[in-house]
Amino acid sequence: MHRSALLRCLLTISLMNQVSGLETLTCKYGDTIEIPCNKGQLDETDVKFVKWKYDKDGNILVKQMNQNATISADVNYKNRVSIKKDFSLVITQVTMADQRTFTCMAVGKEDLLEYSIQLTIYKAPSQPKITNLTTAMVVGKPTMLAQCRTEGASPAANITWFKNKTPLMTDGAAIKINTNLDVDKETRLSTTTSTLEYTAVKGDIDAKFTCQVQHIWSANMDSSPLVFSVNYPTEKVTLQVVSQGPFKEGDNVILKCTADGNPPPSSFNFYIDGEENTVDSNTYTLTNVTREDTGDYKCSLVDNEDIAASVPITVEYLDVVLGTTSKIVKKLGESLEVTVDVKASGAAQTSWKKDNVKLNSLPKFDKLTYSDSGMYECVVSMAGLKETRTFELVVEGPPAITNLIKEHGDSMAKVLKCVAEGSPKPTVQWSVNGTSDESAYEHGKVTYSITIIPKDNLNVSCTASNFLGFDIKSINVSAHQKDEYSDQTALAVGIVVGLTLAVLAIGLAYWLYMKKFRQGSWKIGEKEDGSAEESKKLEENQSQKADV
């Protein structure tokens, strides 16, 4: 005998049956139960005979004083019962068939007593089992989601459905719950089955459904959460441009059509140049687009063209035409007009450079100079597009010698410099031999130099030439350094002579003044002889100064 199971039955709360007035004893299915006779208060010394029976006529066993118990041949109990010293009846492995009335008849020395007990058997239900599970719900359409089942219970178990931990109740519309109760004829145990029919809404996406088994003799038991796909028809489509813009001619552009239905459509209609194209995908690729592909594009459901969406696409373009050839040759002093024709899908920015140096504006040439020659670059940009155009300007002219000078070199050497302008670069031919050198050719100008040591006075000529013509100039070169500066010496002598004559003129004017002053003094009065002599000396001194 399992003592723990026996104790559970003995400690079970006994309740008085309000109908029959019998004492009720409750025990767990499969356990061993001990049913007391008269609550175990019989004195065995006063009892001669005890008999246990069930219901009205079902004999179980008989126990007489000082004798072993005699067990009846009843197939229900012959191998499961025994009697204790205090006349309590022990039944092992109780089943639902044992849920009946048991009576203890005790014959004492003086009277006959009967004690009846109603035995109640309970059994906890099994874990909830989900069957007939669907995979998807359709919005607005009643759907049988699942069936929840629990078995082997006594009394029968209850089943409650939950959505997101909130109990669901039958409302006759969106929620319908059908519950069936079956009792096994042999075991007399109950099976409860509950079916949930539910009408979904879009808000039920990711909702968790569970069923819970509830029983008086066990804790509540929950099934694993059930999550269903929520299907609903498409109400709106969206057309997206997947490729990253801006787009230029030659690019590929990917369009993507999406729908808000579940499951999403597997194919769509794309409208290209007004022509319907049905594809088994939600994307469509425009290849090698041109400016003619600029416009609105549309997609729709295959089975409902009214559910559609559109998107504009702009193919950017930039055409630049330079009104000049790649190389322009012009004559010195001529004019040149530079034009740029820009055709673009948007506002374009234009900038100019000459020999990689930025210019402030479009170059304009009213009268060409040699410095205008160079490589010009025009850059036009817009919306990620850039076009570059270049041309080379060459300003040509015959040579012109602008300066021919001579300088003193080391010792007796003379350095002659010939400055020439022209394009192409002029070459120079000297009429004498010497050590030649030249400067850099910039802006149509170059300086040629030659170092010579003349032995005689020379007339040296410089001839500058290119294929357009020539120019020649000459210069006199003396053999000695002093002759070189004869003109300067003559100038210096002339200046000295001029200054001398100026001093003499001033002295003469002073002498005349003094002479006039002396004559006036004589007319006023007589003078002493000494004074006359002093005046004479003074006069002589003035005459000497004048002579000087």
Image (spheres, rainbow, N blue to C red):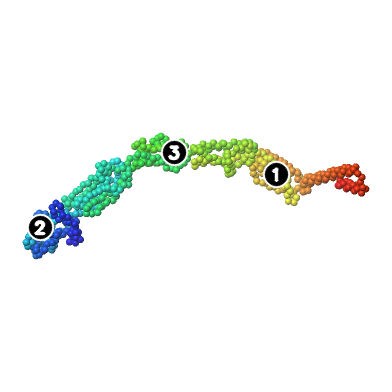
Q: Distance of mark 1 from mark 2, alpha carbons?
A: 158 Å
Q: Which residue is under mark 2?
A: 114
Q: Give the x, y percent position of residue 122.
A: 19, 54
Pointer 2 local density, CA inside 10 Å: few below 14, some 14–19, many at least 20: some
Camera-side residue of 74 and 68: 68
Residue drawn 42% across the image and 42% down it: 242
The residue indicated by pointer 3 is 313
Which image quadrant for residue 202? top left
Q: CA distance from mark 2 to mark 3?
A: 101 Å
Judge the density around disc 3: few (<14), some (14-19), many (≥20) Cα neighbours within 10 Å: some
Q: Give, as a three-letter code, the residue at label 3.
A: Ile
Residue 310, horizontal then vertical, whole percent:
40, 37
Q: Which residue is mark 1?
A: 418
User: Horizontal and vertical percent for residue 512?
Assistant: 86, 43
Tell me whether the residue at label 2 lies in contact with that at label 3, contact meaning CB atoms closer than 8 angstroms.
no
Between disc 3 and disc 1, whose residue precedes? Answer: 3
Q: Quadrant of residue 361?
A: top right
Q: Nearer the viewer, mark 2 or mark 3?
A: 2
Check disc 1: other Cα within 10 Å, few if <14, some if 14-19, many if 20+: many
Residue beneath the point at 55% across and 37% down: 340
Q: Secondary structure at mark 1?
A: strand
Q: Earlier in the sequence, mark 1 or mark 2?
A: 2
